[in-house]
Image (cartoon, rainbow, N blue to C red):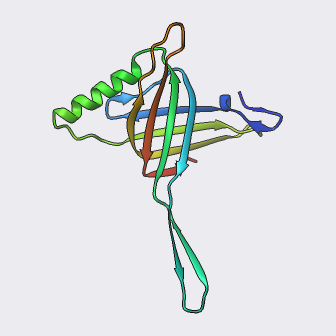
Amino acid sequence: MGAINGLSVGRSWTANMFTQFGEFLIPTITMFEIHATPVMDKSIAVDGNIRYVVIPSGFTGSIEADRSSDVIEQFWVNYESAYYTGSNLLPSTITQTIQEPDGSVTQMIARGVMFEAQDFGNWVGNNIIKQRLNFYASRWENLQ
């Protein structure tokens, strides 16, 4: 694991996801992305000075995986069942671990995560089934 020519690469990364149903282990994640979603505003004073305000306001992200089991479908079936039986749908966490190019390890945790099933895959001939989940998180914090 680690780096190539001093740069982080995808294989330097792992994630552990925990939901109200237990560990959410997706064995073949092929892509993970997370984006800050700050709220921006500005004030234009009578003196003509512009002051920008950027307020942290959560994160959005996506996970893509090649289907190697029914884990994504089963998660969504459990989530939907809990919803329709009136259960409280609780937020999840995603812990990201990165092996840095210098050999150190960085760990971050996304808290307040709610998942959204996006794509269970297209079943075509001999093609690999690609699946996608989106997520929304309230915080992104250091674990160290």
Identify which residue is drawn at 50% across, 7% down: 125
Identify which residue is drawn at 48% across, 14% down: 68
Image spot of residue 143 (x, y percent): 54, 46
Q: Would residue 128 be found to the left or right of residue 22 on screen?
A: right
Whether residue 142 is visible to the viewer of this picture, yes or no, is: no
**Residue reaching furthest left?**
85
Q: Nearer the viewer, residue 64 or 141?
A: 64
Image spot of residue 30 (x, y percent): 58, 26
Image spot of residue 63 (x, y percent): 50, 33
Q: Quadrant of residue 117?
A: top left
Q: Quadrant of residue 102?
A: top right
Identify which residue is drawn at 66% across, 31% down: 10
**Residue reaching furthest front?**
124
Image spot of residue 84 (x, y percent): 18, 33
Identify which residue is drawn at 26% across, 31% down: 80
Q: Would residue 51 be found to the left or right of residue 9 on screen?
A: left
Total count of labels = 0
Whether residue 101 is visible to the viewer of this picture, yes or no, is: yes
**Residue reaching furthest right?**
5
Q: Quadrant of residue 87?
A: top left
Q: Nearer the viewer, residue 13 or 106?
A: 13
**Residue reaching furthest bottom?**
47
Q: Quadrant of the N terminus?
A: top right
Q: Nearer the viewer, residue 3 or 136?
A: 136
Q: Is residue 127 above or below residue 141?
A: above
